[in-house]
């Protein structure tokens, strides 16, 4: 597959409605006090009160809009040396990102193209540095000094609290040590029947769309992975796939949208400002539903639902888009050929050893995660200075790794826009720098559940592919991706499903 970088489409109406409503609320915070000032003045009240209001109103607005205090003069001098686009006083580069969310990734890609392997942007006084070179990334991610998550993760705190994903220092080490045994192979093997059960429900749902134009695959896959993570992480069957109106499932899907909207709206970073807006009101209502259900397994819920759902979705799209992967001898499908070698004509469910034997499917998943990593950005908040190239990035700076860009480096991945699972064969992977491929991050704070995720993705994808032939109808250049915490398509991916036994 060859394709151009992602082309933006018009803005999402829901996000625009929230941005407009939030802006109106903030505007009212200014206009209402000013209106009172006019009334006071018209009644010849104390001019001192008027002047005091004129001072307090702008200061209050500045407090609400200022996400974090200004950095020190030393830090500002150091970050000023890092290449990046010129910006406006105080506002910085925020106007570059005032458009629809699908513009974010193309904009950052262009900045990395223009300014090199280390560059920065500044939004409302907050510096965001981007690293795209594998050696620089290794220096950051492999050092245990740099494990604090960046400012963009703060929006998750109301949902996930300070568990493994968001904690740092001693608390993070304690959480990591406690959770690591839960992802041992012996434990993972016990989850295979849950993977199979919910994968078969997904197949039943997809069967309703055979020979139709396409299936609502985005939602169907999301509900499948939600069922899996709830049953494996919390021991609870919520039946998201089979229940028409599941309040918990709706709340999980909606809270992700609200949090990601907040991440891309710096004026909502302060909790006080957030909870004066419709976005904040809806978030509080949605969180009550989630926390009323259970707080157990919240970290696994976020990591194991959204990221895995995105990975499966993009893998289905790429497998259905690339006939050259499916063709090896005449019309044989390379992935299905492997599955037939494992299962033959049997309809039996997959075992743990079956999933381990799916080497080519694993290569296809890894290549899909190269092109469309579930998490397009990883962020760290520096507690200490770090030297990258000839630049000192000061403590207090947010540094971001950008796999969506790094994974397309032609020096490491020739013809990078082409989907080629053979890149991840054993022989082709041996010489690759370990920090040149980061779908699960790397270093001490890498994804603790990556083996769980790969097994789940193999189970779901193999079950679907044993039952259906898939054809993706969208061209890569026509797909708008949302530059959010999780990499999602803005619109439904149009994938057509045909029963294999009809061939």
Image: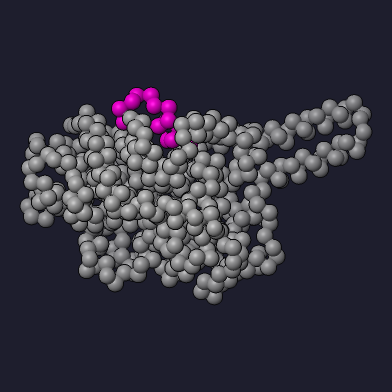
Q: Position of residue 181 (x, y in %)?
A: 37, 53
Residue 168 image-quadrant placement: bottom right
Residue at position x 47%, y 70% in the image: 139
Residue at position x 55%, y 58% in the image: 169
Q: Position of residue 342 (x, y in %)?
A: 12, 50
Residue at position x 24%, y 54% in the image: 362
Image height of 464 relative to 426, above or below: above
State left or right for residue 29 relative to residue 344.
Answer: right
284, 66: nearer the viewer: 284
Image height of 82 relative to 325, above or below: below
18, 344: nearer the viewer: 344
Q: Is residue 373 magenta?
A: no
Residue closest to the far top: 245
Q: Main secondary structure of the magenta part?
A: helix
Q: Report the magenta residues as a range.
A: 241-255
Q: Is residue 249 magenta?
A: yes
Q: Is residue 2 visible?
A: no
Q: Position of residue 389 (x, y in %)?
A: 51, 74
């Amino acid at each position: 597959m060859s394709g151009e970088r992602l082309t933006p489409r018009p803005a999402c109406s829901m996000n625009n409605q929230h941005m407009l409503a939030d802006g109106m609320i903030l505007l009212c915070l200014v206009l209402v006090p000013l209106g009172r000032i006019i009334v006071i003045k018209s009644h010849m009240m104390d001019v001192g009160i008027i002047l005091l209001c004129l001072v307090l109103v702008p200061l209050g607005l500045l407090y609400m809009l200022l996400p974090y205090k200004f950095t020190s003069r030393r830090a500002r001098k150091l970050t000023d040396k890092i290449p990046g686009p010129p910006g406006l006083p105080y506002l910085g580069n925020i106007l570059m990102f005032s458009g629809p969310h699908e513009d974010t990734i193309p904009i950052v890609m262009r900045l990395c193209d223009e300014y090199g392997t280390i560059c920065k942007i500044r939004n409302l006084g907050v510096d965001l540095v981007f690293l795209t070179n594998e050696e620089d990334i290794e220096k950051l991610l492999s050092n245990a000094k740099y494990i604090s998550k960046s400012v963009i993760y703060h929006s998750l705190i109301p949902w996930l609290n300070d568990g493994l994903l968001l904690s740092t220092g001693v608390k993070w080490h304690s959480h990591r040590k406690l959770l690591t045994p839960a992802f041992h192979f012996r434990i993972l093997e016990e989850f295979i029947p849950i993977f199979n059960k919910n994968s078969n429900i997904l197949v039943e749902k997809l069967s309703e769309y055979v020979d139709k134009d396409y299936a609502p695959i985005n939602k169907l896959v999301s509900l499948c992975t939600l069922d899996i993570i709830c049953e494996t992480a919390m021991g609870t069957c919520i039946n998201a796939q089979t229940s028409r109106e599941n309040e918990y499932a709706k709340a999980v899907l909606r809270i992700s949208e609200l949090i990601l909207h907040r991440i891309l709206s710096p004026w909502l970073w302060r909790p006080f400002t957030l909870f004066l807006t419709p976005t904040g009101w809806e978030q509080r209502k949605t969180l009550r539903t989630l926390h009323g259900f259970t707080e157990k397994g919240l970290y696994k819920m976020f990591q194991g639902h959204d990221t895995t759902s995105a990975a499966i979705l993009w893998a289905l799209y790429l497998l259905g888009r690339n006939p050259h992967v499916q063709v090896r001898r005449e019309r044989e499908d390379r992935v299905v050929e492997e599955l037939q070698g494992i299962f033959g004509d049997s309809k039996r469910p997959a075992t743990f050893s079956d999933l381990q034997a799916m080497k080519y499917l694993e290569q296809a998943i890894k290549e899909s995660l190269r092109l469309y990593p579930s998490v397009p950005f990883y962020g760290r908040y520096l507690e200490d200075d770090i030297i990258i190239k000839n630049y000192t990035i000061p403590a207090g700076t947010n540094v971001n790794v950008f796999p969506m860009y790094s994974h397309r480096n032609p020096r490491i991945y020739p013809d990078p826009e082409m989907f080629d699972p053979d890149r991840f064969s054993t022989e082709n992977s041996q010489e690759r720098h370990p920090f040149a491929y980061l779908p699960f991050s790397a270093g001490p704070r890498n994804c603790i559940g990556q083996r769980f995720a790969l097994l789940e993705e193999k189970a779901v994808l193999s079950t679907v592919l044993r039952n259906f032939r898939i054809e993706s109808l969208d061209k890569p250049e026509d797909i708008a991706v949302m530059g959010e915490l999780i990499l999602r398509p803005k619109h439904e991916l149009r994938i057509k499903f045909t029963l294999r036994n009809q061939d």
